[in-house]
Every structure is written in C-alpha cells, then in structure tokens.
Amino acid sequence: MRSDSTHTPPTVPADDLPPGAPATGGMKTAPGTNGFDDLTTEKLLRDAPRVACDDGTTTPSLGGIPLRKKLGEGGMGAVYWGVHPRLERDVAVKVLPSHLADKNADFVRRFKREARIAAKIQSPHLVTVFDVNEESGLYYLVMECVAGASAQKFLREHVGNAQVDEATALDICIAACTGLAAAHAAGVIHRDVKPDNILIPRDGALGAFHFKKAKLADLGIARVETSDNSLLTGANQAMGTPGYMSPEQCKDAATCGAQSDVFAMGATVFELLTGARPFTGTNGFAILQSTVSDAHPNVRKIRPDVSEHTAKLIDRCLAKKPDQRYADASILLDVLIDARTALTPVPQASRLPVYVLAAAACLAIITYIAWPKPAPPTEANNRVTPFGQIAPFAPVTPFAPVTSFTGPGKGETTPSVPDPAVLAETKKKQKEAEEAAAKLADDQRTLDAQKADLAKAVNQYQQNMAATEKAKQAAAAKEKADAAAKVETERLAALEKKREDEARQKEIARLQGLKDEAERLAREKAAQAVAKEMSLDLGGGVNMELVLLTRAQLKR
C-alpha cells in the first residue's frame, strides 16, 4: 500500500528547472553547475556509470542520459531529471530501488513487461514512456518530463481556498480521463489515479496553467490484463493510495478492474471540488476501513454551487459495488464531458421547442392580417426615371392620407390612424397566442416529466419483475430440492427399518434354535438318568424295553 509520501510523478516545477533549461526540453548540454544537484554521492546511483559534463563536473548517467537533478523519491524508487542526448529533450528517469530488484526477480520481470505495454499506449494525456532498460544492475524507466505542477500541488499552493471551481475541476479530470480511457483500451488498469498523479503543464514559473492538456502519470503499479487472461503484478497486495482505492482494491489490488480506476477518478473530482478526500481516517488502515464501510459525503452539502449533474456523477463513481459504477473510463469520459457542457449556458433562442416557434409564426401571421395596410400604389409613386430606375416612394407617415374605396367609382380620403377596435383585437389575439404558447410550453414540460416518471416506473417495474421471477425460480428450485431430500430421507428410513427387521428375525430364529437345542439336550439327559435308575441287571445288559418305555413317558 502506498501513501502520498511514496509517490514521485515525472514532473518538475517550472520555477525549479535549472537556469537555461527549457520548460519542455531541447537542451543538449548542461548550462552550468548552478541549479544542478551533485548526484555522485547518491546511494541509489552509486553503481551507475559517470559521464563528464561541459561544465567540468561528472554526474551519474543511465542509458547515456546524464542525470542532473533529483525530482523526488518514494517507495517505488527515485526520479531524476536529465536531458536525452539523442532526443534532445527533458526526460524523467525513474530508477527502481535495489532492494526490490535484488530480492524479487519476478517483480523485475513484471516491471519490464508492464513498462513495454505502457510504452505502446499513445495518448497526449498520458505521460509517455520512452524506454525501459537495465544498466549496471539498475532498472529504470525513461519518461516524458512535464514542466508544471500536479493537480495536488495546484490545489494546495495555487488555489487560495483549497477548492477548484467546477469547470476547472472537470477540465482537469476530462483530460486525465482521456488518458485513462486509452490505458483501459489497451488492457491496462492504473490502480493509483489521484490528483498527485495528474500533471498540469504550465508556461514558465508565472505562466498560465493548461488544464485541458493535463496528463495522467505513474503507471508504475498498473495491472495488465493479458490475452490469456493472466495478470501481471503480484496478488493479494493492497497497492494504491488510501482515500482513492476502491473497496475491492482495499482487499486485493491484483484482481481489481477498470471500475476501481473509475472509483479513484470520482474521488479525485470530489477532492478537487472540496479540498478533501471522500474517505479519511487517522491512519492508512482507518482510511481503508472507512472506504469499505462508510458512505461518502454529499458533495453538494460541502459545495452547494456544484451542479446536480456533477454530484450524480461523483455518487455513481463512488458506489461500493463495482457493477454500480461506470464500466470503464471511456463511459466516464462521456459523462464528464456532458457535465462540463451543461455548465456552459446555451442561448435561449436555440433551445426553443418547435411548438413555441410555431406559435410565434401564427402570431406574426395574425398581426400581418389585422394591421392596417398602406395606400395602394399610384402612377406617381411608380414612375420611371429617364435612366430606367424606379423612383423612390414618397415617404408615408402614420398620418398620411390613404384612399379607401367605399363603392363603385367613389372614394374618400381618411386618416391612416389604426382603428382602436382593430388594435384591441390584435392585442387580444397576440396575448391569446402568447398564453397558448406558454400553456403549450408548460404542457410539454409536464409531459416530459411524466414521460421521465413513466420510464423510471417501467424500469423499476421491470427490475421488480426480474427480482420476483428470480425469487420464484429460487423458491421452485428450493422446493424441488426439499422434495428430493424428503424422498431420499424416506427411502433411507425404509431401508434402515427393513434391515433392522431382518436382523431382528434372524436373532429371534437363532435364539429359538438355541432354546430347542437346550430342551432336546435336557430331555436326553433326563432319559439317561431315568434309564440308569430303572436299569436291570440282565447279565450285564440293559432292559431296552424299559428304556424305550421310559423315554416315551418323558416325551409325553
């Protein structure tokens, strides 16, 4: 799990660039020692090759790139500023810490493969990865260096009340989401979207920020979905930044999908608008626990001026279940653009419904018919000049005389003042037309609201019907399973009873046999005893007749 202190985006503040270094690259040799860091004693770069600079100093280099300034350091390594000698542009070189590279060869393999995949993603709103390589036992990334500030730094240092206006916040997030959509299209899940990873270019130390050109940075802990459905990066690791990680990412970052990045983008919009993360705590574990179990604050209770469109967007992004969020960054991007467009008022005339325009046309026709007509053209005002041009009409004032024909061959001159009755009738019809147009507009709005309510009701009804059908199917399946279990229980009980009955009968038969045998032996013993007592000495023999008689008596 990463905290804010372990992150170093490939950006360098425009006012921190060494003297003579351009804001966006193009320096072939170092301009001098002033503003550069002495990296010869840098522990992480102790095994890196040294190169001589034009100012007579030496500095570590990787891939032939002299490293002249340390931009920052975190748990995933350190980032250094340099100028690529062949590309002739500023670059940021991210070096992996040796303890990660030495102890985990599988980590290095994943790092290199993910970097190659990230380098193939083309988007003006992603920090470009130029190269990934190894030299002198050091693994490093060569990335685009953006002169400006992260959205986090802009929020903290350049916005007085630590809150960004809604239009600016949406412009920043639209640009970052454009880069994120390109990553998702390539099968790359970022897993660490946050304001500190959104870089805003700037024209020099005091120049304007270009919010619409913001770039998403740091794919260093990204997860790559491969064609064989295998995953790169380790499993069961809570990688990311607490406060922006989705509930599922808090449990296992290795299996989180595009919806986790959508969650983080929603948290980013929330923080830009409110100046605070949607989930907080006294430590990282408490923040993760809050993310999993607590509801996020309503952004409009903190910023009542935030539009409802943006508030709903944030609510959906921060839903606890992934399937309740937008599916990926491309869908979220469309919603962000809609929210931004809604902030720019459209001229009222261009939004007039057709029925209002029709009513206005009818009003114009009625006014034309009812309004008094000017005098008919005469020969004088249709005369032709010697040059074949039509002479201009004589000016007609509201009180110019006009001729009205009251009968055959008769005419009289009357003033051209409009008849008050006609004016009253015209105004009456005009008012009626305006009222009709207003009523039509109200009716249309009511109809639209009813349609929306009906659509919502139909959707809810379909969901209820689907849930009811699902419940019926589950109940039927349970009933079927219960019936089968009952039949099986009864079968087993009958089988057990049959076995017990058979065993009982066998035991009874065995005991009866033992009893019969005992009685037989008893009778024979008694007969022998009687025969012995009744025996007669007939020359040493036995009187068999008496013995048989005795046995017969015993049997009776």
Image (cartoon, rainbow, N blue to C red):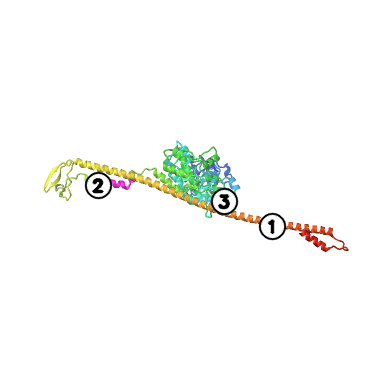
Marks 2/1: CA distance? 114 Å
Residue annotated with mark 3: 109
Q: x, y percentage for residue 169? A: 44, 42
Question: Crowding at label 2, few (<14), some or many (≥20) Cα neighbours within 10 Å?
Answer: few
| Mark identifier at residue 365 | 2
Task: Please identify the quadrant where the C terminus is shown.
Answer: bottom right
Identify which residue, 537 or 47, lies in the foreground.
537
- Membership of 352 in magenta stretch: yes
Task: Please identify the quadrant where the N terminus is shown.
Answer: top right
The answer to the question of whether label 2 and label 3 lie on touching residues, with beta carbons closer than 8 A, is no
User: Could you tell me the amino acid type at mark 3?
Assistant: Arg
Marks 1/3: CA distance? 74 Å
User: Could you tell me the amino acid type at mark 2?
Assistant: Ile
Marks 2/3: CA distance? 79 Å
- The mark closer to the camera, 2 or 3, is 2
- Membership of 85 in magenta stretch: no
Identify which residue, 363 or 70, lies in the foreground.
363
Residue at image point 24% right, 42% down: 428
The quarter holding residue 203 reads top left
Q: x, y percentage for residue 417? A: 18, 41
Residue annotated with mark 1: 506
Residue 145 visible in rendering: no
> Furthest residue to the right?
539
- Horizontal arrangement in the rendering, residue 4 relative to residue 452 (left or right): right
Q: Secondary structure at mark 2?
A: helix
Residue 196 visible in rendering: yes
- Horizontal arrangement in the rendering, residue 265 relative to residue 348 (left or right): right
Give, as a single range, the part of the protein colored magenta.
350-360
- The mark closer to the camera, 2 or 1, is 1
> Furthest residue to the left?
409
